[in-house]
Image (spheres, helix red, strand yellow):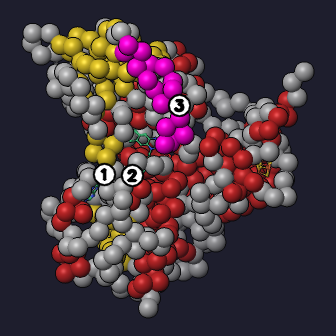
Amino acid sequence: MINLKQIKNPMPEQDPVVRAGNFKEVAEGYTPQMAINEAMRCLKCRKKPCTKGCPVMVRIPEFVAKVAEGEFEEAYQIISETSALPRICGRVCPQENQCEGYCVQGVNGEPVSIGRLERFVADWHAEHESDCCETVTEAEGCSCGCSGTSADTPHGNCKKVAVVGAGPAGLTCAGDLASKGYDVTVFESLHKPGGVLAYGIPEFRLPKDIVAAEVAKLESRGVKFINNAVIGRSETVDELFEDGYEAVFVGTGAGLPSFMNIPGENLLGVCSANEYLTRINLMKGYLPEYDTPVQKAKRIAVVGGGNVAMDAARCAKRMGAEKVYIVYRRSMDEIPARREEIHHAIEEGIDFQLLRNPVAVIGDENGYVTGLECVEMELGEPDASGRRRPVVKEGSNFVLDVDCVIMAIGTKLNKLILETTENLEANERGGIGTDAGAATNREGVFAGGDAVTGAATVILAMGAGKTAAASIDEYLDK
Ligand code: FAD
Ligand code: SF4
């Protein structure tokens, strides 16, 4: 007999058949009553294991208790003590490996839906933000800490800081520095801020008005954004110092696509997931009023098993592909994407070709893709990452009949900043080298997020931005 307290309150979602034809958000969010019911599942554990599972140590049991009492604004205040982007993290964090992975309710049932509650609280706050600010004057500031008035732009200290890259690391760093009164300018190479939140993660997982609202909040707090500025090309980090910036934070991510180096990868119809997703998300290729060219193939193979692969496959379905494969060389137990994305992809009809690995892309006489030759794999001994190593089954070659192949096998660090900043040292992964406080070997230069770690997560990038802001404040306050 199932004890209802042991399972999560379900999230209202768009029907899979309907949503596979649109880009509207899949998960529709808890109602206040659903949130209260879910929060009441919390056991109020004395040792608070969930908090230890959160990279930025959100005080989870405390905020969940406020939700259970219906005190949503107080819950928001608790979350925002440590998390700069809760509307985003509530939607995209891999909670199953973080907070929810440590939740005691998960031992005999399903963990408390900490991510859904975080999303609910942050959305509730955003919806009611203007109400809570109506009663405060510009001079006194809003006690809720929202962007409604000057509450969180305390006093200018005239010190200029440059932030390079407007992804979660850069945005968080900029926000924390603005709160401390610094004069912050963010330089972004694309035409819109947001980093992966804007160009990578699709609208149906993370509506872009949420990202735009976070950017607008920063602007209202005095942060300046200069888009279409490729630091290392338009000007270097060293030139930023000459322009009067007293510290520079580098949060340029790891957006350089990787390819497999197999025969046929240069055929027409092969592209990187980053390019495909950028055309669809940032350049709005899914909207008929935009003339962005996007591959509109009928049969698509997406190679990889991470969030990027799931996003590309689910976009392909929504762009009208009849058949979409995920080709992944390990099994479902090792696949790295968020569980929710895998579940949604299966519901939407994506065909998972597990324990399969491409060996060649096949094309016709005009250079267009006509198939993807793969081999079957089996799992051997664990490798250095602890995951079982995929081994080729000899003679198992077969061809998937596709007219487009999207490579989503990971991204690399772009070396531009390292190559153009005098004496800036790299770490052993090839990223920008930093100490625990995000300081590089160059005085006044700090770095964080994927640019340091290689491809990771939004919350880790956000945490790095926070650490860097605290270190920059300490450095400039000396
Ligand atoms: P980015 O978000 O990459 O931002 C870096 C910014 O710097 C970019 O805007 C870039 O244009 C800019 N830039 C680069 N070079 C320069 C330069 N020289 N001058 C000026 N600007 C520059 N993580 C999760 O936690 N959950 C998910 O569900 C998830 N899904 C993902 C889906 C996709 C498709 C991708 C690609 C990644 C996903 N991730 C996910 C990973 C996560 O988005 C990243 O770890 C995170 O965005 C890293 O943040 P960042 O600020 O370090 O870098
Ligand atoms: Fe509540 Fe789960 Fe955290 Fe325990 S581990 S306090 S049940 S959210």
Q: Is 390 one of the magenta-colored residues? A: yes
Where's the C terminus, which quadrant?
A: bottom left
- Please name whichever residue, 103 or 16, is drawn nearer the observer in this view of the structure: 103
Q: From the top left corner, tell me how far across and down residue 442 is, in percent.
A: 30, 77
Number of numbered labels in the structure image: 3
Under mark 1, the amino acid is: Leu
Q: Which residue is mark 2?
A: 454
Label 2 or label 1, whichever comes before in sequence order: 1
Q: Which residue is mark 3?
A: 381
Q: Residue at x 80, y 45 (%)?
A: 104
Q: Residue at x 36, y 55 (%)?
A: 429
* CA separation in Å, label 2 and label 1: 6 Å
Is the residue 213 above or below the residue 18 in the image?
A: below
At mark 3, the secondary structure is strand
* CA separation in Å, label 3 and label 1: 29 Å
Asked if residue 400 lies left or right of residue 58, the reply is left
Under mark 2, the amino acid is: Gly
- Please name whichever residue, 330 or 89, is drawn nearer the observer in this view of the structure: 330
Q: From the top left corner, tell me how far across and down residue 424 is, in percent.
A: 26, 70
